[in-house]
Image (cartoon, helix red, strand yellow):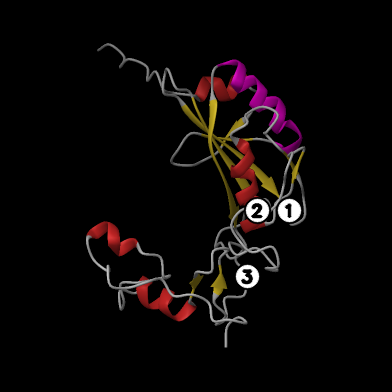
Amino acid sequence: MPAPPADPRDVTGLIAELGLTEDDTAEPTALVPSERLREVAESLKERGFMLMDTVGLDYLTYTQPRPKRFAVLHNIYHPYDHRRLFLRVWLDDGEALDSLYPVWKAANYLEREVYDLMGVEFVGHPDLRKVLTPDDLEGHPLRKDFPLGETPTLFRDGRFLDPAAFRAGVTGQQSGLTGYRGELRRGRGEDRLPPVMPEGGPK
């Protein structure tokens, strides 16, 4: 019986060619030492790959042991043969990572978001500053130890996320979560305006 044809999107050979270890995940993922990240990214760019997304992960409360608390995951994609590869870099708290901006300009806002929400610093980024949260917000909201409390999160344009309403929305008790007017896209909520933070801050 003939062997089934090879999957043209299989990246197992590419991971080995780059001298990386394959991670045990549902999606094709390579473990990259932090000091090799930019070198690996440049090799992938030479092969026609592009950066699609960058996310930060905090494993502080994860039930299974992990090499380090944080991981940065880069989603790399080839637009012609549709191969996809995730690059995972493990980091300790306070450990910086080389920016991929010199390789792919798409890293600009992606890395700024990870810096803002997770606190990972990217060395060589041309403009590493917050992109979502207010400049005076202390901490990084996507870290597992970020205090949730009962203080509304204020966004730059005056809208805010109220914790009680957020929890109620997540559990299905209410339809509105944040004051964003998402209902308008579904043809509802025309009579409501988004709530605005009271003058002088939360009471």
Q: Give the range drawn in magenta.
A: 33-47
Q: Badge 3 local density, few (<14 within 10 Å), some, or many (20+)? A: few
Question: In front: 102, or 47?
Answer: 102
- Magenta portion: prevailing SS class: helix
Q: Is mark 1 on a helix, strand or loop?
A: loop
- Report crowding for label 2: few under 14, some 14 to 19, many 20 or more residues within 10 A (C-alpha): many
How far across and down, in percent of the image, does residue 137 sit? 67, 68
Left/right placement of residue 3 relative to residue 165 reads left
User: In the picture shown, does residue 110 fall above or below 118?
Assistant: above
Quadrant for residue 102, please give it: top right
Query: Which image quarter holds the C terminus?
Result: bottom right
User: Label 1, label 2: how many angstroms apart (C-alpha)?
Assistant: 6 Å
| Disc nearer the start of the sequence (1/3) | 1
Labels 2 and 3 touching (C-beta < 8 A): no
Alpha carbon distance from label 2 to label 3: 14 Å
First along the sequence among labels 1 and 2: 2
Residue matched to label 3: 146
What is the residue that sits farthest to the top in this orientation? 2
* Residue in front for this viewpoint, 193 or 50: 193
Mark 1 near mark 2, Cβ–Cβ under 8 Å?
yes
Q: As drawn, is 148 to the left or to the right of 97?
A: left
The secondary structure type at the circle numbered 3 is loop
Looking at the picture, which amino acid does disc 3 mark?
A: Phe
Rendered view: 6 above or below 88: above
In the image, what residue type sits under mark 1? Answer: Asp
Queried whether the magenta region covers residue 129, the answer comes back as no
Residue that badge 1 annotates: 92
Badge 2 is on which residue?
70
Check the image and report above or below for 75 versus 144: above
